[in-house]
Image (cartoon, rainbow, N blue to C red):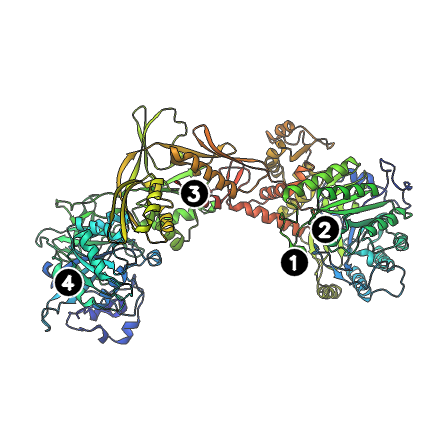
Amino acid sequence: MAGAAALRRFAPRIARHVAAAPSLSRNPLQQPERLLSSQSSPEHGPRGAVPGSELALYPPERVRNFSIIAHVDHGKSTLADRLLELTGTIQKGHGQPQYLDKLQVERERGITVKAQTATMFYRHTTASLDSDAPRYLLNLIDTPGHVDFSYEVSRSLAACQGALLVVDAAQGVQAQTIANFYLAFESNLSIIPVINKIDQPTADPDNVKDQLKRLFDIDPSEALLTSAKTGKGLEQVLPAVIERIPFPRGKCDSPVRMLLLDSYYDEYKGVICHVAVVDGALRKGDKIASASTGRAYEVLDVGIMHPELTPTGVLYTGQVGYVISGMRSTKEARIGDTLHQAKSTVEPLPGFKPAKHMVFSGLYPADGSDFEALSHAIEKLTCNDASVSVTKETSNALGMGFRCGFLGLLHMDVFHQRLEQEYGAQVISTIPTVPYIFEYGDGSKIQVENPAALASNPGKRVVACWEPTVIATIIIPSEYVGPVIMLCSERRGEQLEYTFIDAQRALLKYRLPLKEIIVDFYNELKGITSGYATFDYEDSEYQQSDLVKMDILLNGQPVDAMATIVHNQKAQRVGRELVEKLKKFIERQMFEITIQAAIGSKVIARETLSAMRKNVLAKCYGGDITRKKKLLEKQKEGKKRMKRVGSVDIPQEAFHELLKVSNSK
Amino acid sequence: MLRLAFPLVSHLPPKKPPPIRPRPPPARRYAASAAATSSPSPPSLPELPPSSVYVHLSFCRKRCHYCDFPIVALGSSSGTTPSRGEGADDPRIVDYVRLLLREVAATRPVSDDGVPLETVFFGGGTPSLVPPRLVAAVLDALRGRFGLSACPEVSIEMDPGTFDAARLRELVGVGVNRVSLGVQAFQDDLLRACGRAHGVEEVHEAVGIVTACEGLQNWSMDLISSLPNQTKEMWEESLRCTVDARPTHVSVYDLQIEQGTKFGQMYTPGVFPLPCDTESANFYKIASKRLSEAGYNHYEISSYCKPGYECKHNLTYWQNRPFYAFGLGSASYIDGVRYSRPRRMKEYAEWVQKLEDGTWSHESRSSDSKDMAMDVVMLSLRTAWGLDLQSFSKSFGKSLALSLCNTFRPFGESGLVIAMDMERRALPHIDFELDLQSEDNFGSRVAFIRLSDPHGFLLSNELISLAFGIISPLQGYTFHSDIDYFPVD
């Protein structure tokens, strides 16, 4: 096994000498023990270098760029860990599992949110066993798997020439497998099917092979059978990568041109971009420019991820690594952008698109006084996730906050979770909404990202409304087809396809309004199928729809943060549900409270919360007023958790509960 | 026992012919009482030395199921009417009174120029279990230490079944002139369910003894509403029996379920067999209505009296005036400091020792003005006299008074808060509005604000905690405005 510099990550401070030629230490275990255990600060510590001269040993023909795609939990991260170990890039038993999933949220959810790359050195010994066996530089590009990030995935895949399509031997093809396969297929990647987890008692690799054949026309003989857990079959994987995946075709002698895969913000180094060099070579000190912004930068540091930042001073055609160039914010580093030699005109790489925000919600500090803290947290987090759009907004109920646009539901969820986990922010979020388009009689059109911003009585006629839709793929055991069809039609879905992928399982395709799936669709789907359903979707076009704005009023005063846009036919049901829920969560106050749902001036649901009858301490307590006073002070403190509209105090829970109200039941 | 304060003053014949012939005014009179109480002085800051004393006599035969007071249960041995048993006094009582006397002796009067005591209140516990001669000893000690005015109000709490006519006579003989009778209910089932040590028969007997006692004009009856399984009919019956007994004062307490009591383990407020909020609010309204019809003034959230028979001692509390306190768990308010004594006998005894040694002393402290303002608001809004805006403005600033009134304005409109003029006549809401239009107008019509009876009183916790929010605002939340929750950007 090759991998001279394999242990650099574990020996940041004395890495210099390990970074020598590949032949120096062929077995990572020969490294002194203390180096193996001094695993620290992979992010910020001084890092060893791989001399550029070493990278020069890997012309494009000796480079393979590939990614691993899989349905969630089919073993993608474990397989990646094994490959990194197999090449000595990381040490077995050291470091954390799911090595490439660095965020807490990624580990907890078993998902990938940010793209990562890792460079491995590998001696291809299958052909010849002698020490002259050719050495390869393999770049594993780890992509997010979720549809929210399909653009990011497509950019990552654009840097690859092949992909390992990992399928669980027992579970078979799932919704995300299909979505990922098509993304890879459309990117013209060579696909290596890997049927994983064959050690499981319920594994049925032959059935999976049949599915692959039927669904993707993949020759069953191509499938590798592995168990990333036990190690079985893993030895075939990297040889297959080298033999079946073409090398990157770039022009070595052209000026440098590279694809920006992803970026993240480091407090000490600034913005770090992951790039794939398409043409030419990139050297420290070069001047580069962004094709989308035109801004120019100097390359301050360049290197490979091995698996952490490892300076090399150069990256050659076809190679994948990182660049630090003095960008101040990840907003300057747009995923899919082309970076090229400054002062030269180059053809930008295809496929660049600005982020498209599909889900919006208002974020407010749970405690009014924490606005500054929330603002700070959002600023920090968007440094690392430039795909979130943020604008300030003010609500009469929640005060000052932000309207944030997300790529999708998961993205929103992840953003919330990261705000809480990484920045300790306590937030109230408003009911998520999608960008609707309203057209008025005078021909004007507006895009509505915040229902509160849509005038309840605009004074002009709405002639048409449009809402975004998705094409959803649902795979279920066939006995659940009935309830799932029911659910989809309740959600205003239009059936596009209904097929069987094997004797037991059906595949349904639906066009669904995005709004219908953003709150609780997946949970409900899981619920009615005992957890067996898998679900994925892709963005589709806008469709015309009969939409209305629904206001929630407390004692006649609209609560802007509770306004929603709903389908006309569902308005009454949703309105009633919201109003009932609010009645449950608003506490009685010293006056009667009417809770109404209204469309324009028409009230469609109403509840009355009668006035509090009694709150008095009519107890004999002698002269001991301190206890009573404490009680009243506690009562006063209770108000702190309230948001107020007009004279009505609304507990924060009410906002959280509203999020749970289905828009579609 | 849900008991304590709220005795009554005497005089003025009741409207209807009483079951027993009205008595002439008692020999010992507390001269200024009527005048002082019908228009009490504004809440004063505690610069004056205390002229009131609370004495805690902590013994009960057994603990009632709702009680979380510091008491000592004696058990059935000291059963009913242990009255004349000279030498048969329970040693626990004797020891405790000795301790009390030591505390009195070790307490330095706040002023040397001898402001005499105007009120003494023996609360408990069941003070009627304490032999009169020991009560006399305490009174003597107080007289010796602080001086007693010419006609002080001396109240004692008594439970039916713990005294006979002779014992009451004895108490009156040593200077007691007001009795607070812990009746609580007129239904045997309810009394039993509360763990009371007496039944209805003892209640009637006790009322007979009290009303027949020469020299005792002023007595109060305690009732508890919202007891488990209490029905509206039972409550009406209790109120009827109360009115028939013609006490000069009635205290109506609403059952509070306290943690750590037997009721606390058995019941959840608002859940059967306790009445729901609506029912229990209704009990409160019925009491207010029936007692008012019978000629009682509802002068404080839980207190009613015939005109002029307010409990002078309790007025000390409502007016935020200082008072001494002696005994287990009792709370004093001296030199601006509220102090609650230890609630366990052993710790209390140790504390008295320290007081004697001089290793513990009541320190004087200038209280925080916010705290003081909260006390004034909390206490005065419990009463029918309400909050004196002029005096409040003088002490805490006009703008705070104005903010308070602005906070209460919507509740003036809905009738929970009443604005009153200098003569404490209710003003129409428009006058309240006009007064609030500018700082200059403020106070031109409205001199007092009070909570209405019964609806404002019923929501007093809400209204007072709103006021607290104005006096001592929470970060990030304002009570009177919709927009400024946030720091200015």
Q: Alpha-carbon distance for marks 2 and 1?
A: 21 Å
The residue under label 3 is: A661
Is mark 2 in CB contact (under 8 Å) with mark 1? no
The residue under label 1 is: B260
- A591 with respect to A118 (left or right): right
> Chain under label 3?
A
Is mark 4 in CB contact (under 8 Å) with mark 2? no
Q: Mark 3 falls on what kind of element?
A: loop
Name the one closer to the observer, A457 or A126. Answer: A126
Q: Mark 2 falls on what kind of element?
A: loop
Q: Is residue A586 positioned above or below A270 on the image?
A: above
Q: Mark 4 falls on what kind of element?
A: helix
- Marks 3 & 4 on one chain: yes
Q: Which mark is residue B446?
A: none
Q: Position of residue A94 (x, y in %)?
A: 30, 69
Q: Position of residue B433 (x, y in %)?
A: 61, 29
The residue under label 4 is: A240
Residue B168 visible? The answer is yes
Q: Residue at x 66, y 41 (%)?
A: B281
Q: Which numbered disc, 4 or 2, marks the residue that appears first in the sequence?
A: 4
> Chain under label 1?
B
The mark closer to the camera, 4 or 2, is: 4
The residue under label 2 is: A623
Q: Which amino acid, by three-letter code, is at mark 3? A: Val
Q: Quadrant of the N terminus of chain A?
A: bottom left
The mark closer to the camera, 4 or 1, is: 4
> Chain under label 2?
A
